[in-house]
Amino acid sequence: MPYEELHHTADWCLRVWADNLPSLFAEAAQGMNALSGAQPAPGPVTRRTLSLSAPDAESLLVAFLSELIYAAEQEKVTFSRFNVTTLEHSDGWELKAEMDGAPLASATKTIKAATYHNLQIRQTDRGYEVEIVFDV
């Protein structure tokens, strides 16, 4: 499990790590699902492709997680498989994610937003790492 919940006074905080940046984004999504207790309903698979751009990797991560929060809250869909690619270029970052999911059967906790609070993606001995604070 390449993520762990950290103690935070008012919100929820998650530390995520992975070998590379695309995997970090996918693991952050998995960790966020685990925090919320998202449970997919049985039935047909929902497939979606998501394309995003942002000025930096941290903003791209917040945008990605925000799209997943929106899908759960407004569309009642949760995604459980992520094939993520990221690309850095002179104007910023791009992300493409191919995702598989299902209708959201239930969630034990509601996440309102992924925040920028102390958000910094960094390279460590175990690859890329980030701590994400979620507004609940």
Image (cartoon, grey):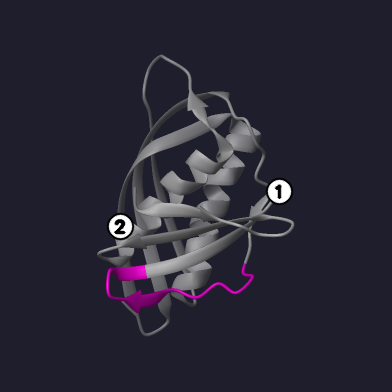
| Residue furthest out toward the top | 43
Whether residue 92 is visible, yes or no, is yes
Q: Is residue 117 magenta?
A: yes
Check disc 1 and give the amino acid type. Val
The answer to whether 41 is drawn above or below residue 127 in the figure is: above
The answer to whether 31 is drawn above or below residue 44 in the figure is: below
Mark number, residue 39: none
Q: Is residue 65 magenta?
A: no
- Which is nearer the N-term, disc 1 or disc 2? 2
Q: Secondary structure at mark 2?
A: helix
Place of residue 57 in the rendered image (x, y in percent of width and height, measured from the top left)? 44, 72
Residue at coordinates 43% horizontally, 78% vertically from top-left?
92
Q: Secondary structure at mark 1?
A: loop
Mark number, residue 23: 2
Residue at coordinates 57% horizontally, 39% vertically from top-left?
36
**What is the chief secondary structure element of the magenta stretch?**
loop
Place of residue 107 in the rendered image (x, y in percent of width and height, measured from the top left)? 60, 29
Residue toward you, 25 or 93: 25
Check disc 2 and give the amino acid type. Ser
Does residue 129 appear left or right of residue 59 in this picture? left
Other-residue count near label 2 (Cα within 10 Å), few / some / many at <14 / 14–19 / ≥20: many
| Residue furthest out toward the bottom | 90
Kindly report the distance in space between the C-alpha atoms of the residues bearing marks 1 and 2: 25 Å
Mark number, residue 136: 1
Magenta residues span 116-128
